[in-house]
Image (cartoon, helix red, strand yellow):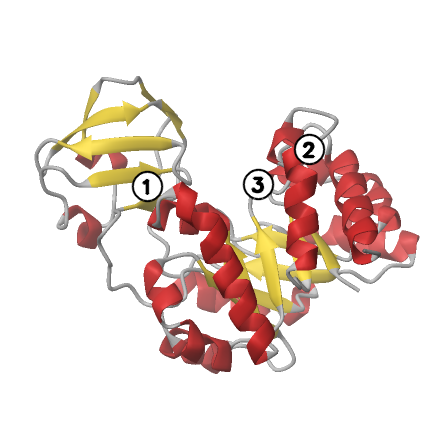
């Protein structure tokens, strides 16, 4: 049976909401630790455990690590980036290793590609695709590869506490090679599954060796869609799925599966077709993120996700 994962967040922070989601068929949840530590997330974990007791369902709990992901810094208030405007790149508070790679013509993708900047110099950039930028959102420099450690100090601290909070698996972002997974394995408490997120070209190019070190592959289409032209993403997903099937390695499909439902009570036809295709490709898990973490209809999201997956399994 395919696992159905939601993501914990303010929209489903109450045990009553999580209980309803579990009763509908959600089998696991993701806790994103890019912006917080496990102790800071304790109220969410406690709500999940209360919901599990009430529903009689024991869900999997995955923590999504910070890892080598590039992010902007913390801002006193969100940055308004109007299209056509200019910004000093130091305002983004990027790590020094990233700032040193900036040069005229270099693109900067922000918040999973929602915003796009183009460097005019190493110090200034033009806003090509505008919007509001919040603290600690993702950043990407297409065509550039940064050398960052697989685990941050915060990651190591969270791993040390994982079992205490009932964590069952760890999602490692931006896996670049099997060596990244070996670093995580060395710090991973016994019994926890390791999910390798494929979301950059380094990971794609070394997928064969990554398959040997992971318990499950995650086709993370958010940042992966920043690494290639979007029109190439569907076939790249198909290629990764096919290789996982041939090698007998389970895989998860994630990102924007029901994105319209962050605000709409019903999905688009394209979204339910996307879920069905993931099932037919052999996915062992599917996951929604912002739809349940911050969306307006977290329970309905799980209802549609579960029903679409189960109907697709019967094909």
Q: Residue 230 in the image: state x and y as whole percent.
A: 41, 42
Q: CA distance from mark 1 to mark 2?
A: 37 Å
Q: CA distance from mark 1 to mark 3?
A: 24 Å
Depth check, mark 1 against mark 2: the one in front is 2
Up-down: is 153 above or below 288?
below
Q: Residue 286 in the image: state x and y as whole percent.
A: 66, 54
Who comes first in sequence, dot 1 or dot 3? 1
Up-down: is 290 above or below 296?
below
Q: Residues within 10 Å of mark 3 (few under 14, many from 20)?
A: some
Q: Residue at x 60, y 35 (%)?
A: 259
Instruction: Say whether residue 26 is left or right of residue 267.
Output: right
Who comes first in sequence, dot 2 or dot 3? 3
Judging from the image, what secondary structure is the residue with disc 2 in? helix
Q: Residue 187 in the image: state x and y as whole percent.
A: 48, 78
Q: Residue at x 68, y 33 (%)?
A: 269
Up-down: is 97 above or below 195?
above
Judging from the image, what secondary structure is the residue with disc 1 in? loop
Q: If the image is split into quadrants, where does the N terminus sit?
A: bottom right
What residue is pinned by disc 1? 73
Instruction: Say whether residue 39 is left or right of residue 2.
Output: left
Who comes first in sequence, dot 1 or dot 2? 1
Q: Residue 91 in the image: state x and y as whole percent.
A: 23, 32
Q: If the image is split into quadrants, where does the C terminus sit?
A: bottom right
What residue is pinned by disc 3? 256
Total residue callouts: 3
What residue is pinned by disc 2? 269
Q: Residue at x 70, y 31 (%)?
A: 267
């Amino acid at each position: 049976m395919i696992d159905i994962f939601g993501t914990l967040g303010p929209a489903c922070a109450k045990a009553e909401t999580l209980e309803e989601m579990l009763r509908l068929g959600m089998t696991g949840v993701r806790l994103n630790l890019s912006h917080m530590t496990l102790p800071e997330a304790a109220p969410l974990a406690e709500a999940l455990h209360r919901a599990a007791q009430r529903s009689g369902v024991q869900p999997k709990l995955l923590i999504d690590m910070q890892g080598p992901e590039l992010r902007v810094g913390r801002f006193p208030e969100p940055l308004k980036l109007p299209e056509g405007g200019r910004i000093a790149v130091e305002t983004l508070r990027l790590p020094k290793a990233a700032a040193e790679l900036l040069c005229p013509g270099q693109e900067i993708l922000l918040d999973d590609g929602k915003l796009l900047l183009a460097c005019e110099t190493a110090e200034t950039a033009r806003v090509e695709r505008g919007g509001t930028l919040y603290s600690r959102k993702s950043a990407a420099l297409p065509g550039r590869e940064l050398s960052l450690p697989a685990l941050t100090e915060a990651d190591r601290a969270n791993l040390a506490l994982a079992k205490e909070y009932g964590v069952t698996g760890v999602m490692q972002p931006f896996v670049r090679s099997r060596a990244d997974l070996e670093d995580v394995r060395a710090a991973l408490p016994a019994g926890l599954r390791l999910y390798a997120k494929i979301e950059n070209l380094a990971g794609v190019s070394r997928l064969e060796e990554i398959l040997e070190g992971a318990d499950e592959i995650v086709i993370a289409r958010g940042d992966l869609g920043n690494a290639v032209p979007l029109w190439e993403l569907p076939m790249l997903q198909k290629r990764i799925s096919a290789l996982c099937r041939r090698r007998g390695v389970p895989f998860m499909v994630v990102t924007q599966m029901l994105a319209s439902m962050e605000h709409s009570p019903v999905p688009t036809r394209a979204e339910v077709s996307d879920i069905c295709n993931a099932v037919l490709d052999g996915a062992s898990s599917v996951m929604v993120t912002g739809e349940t973490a911050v969306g307006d209809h977290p329970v309905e999201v799980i209802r549609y996700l579960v029903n679409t997956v189960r109907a697709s399994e019967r094909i």
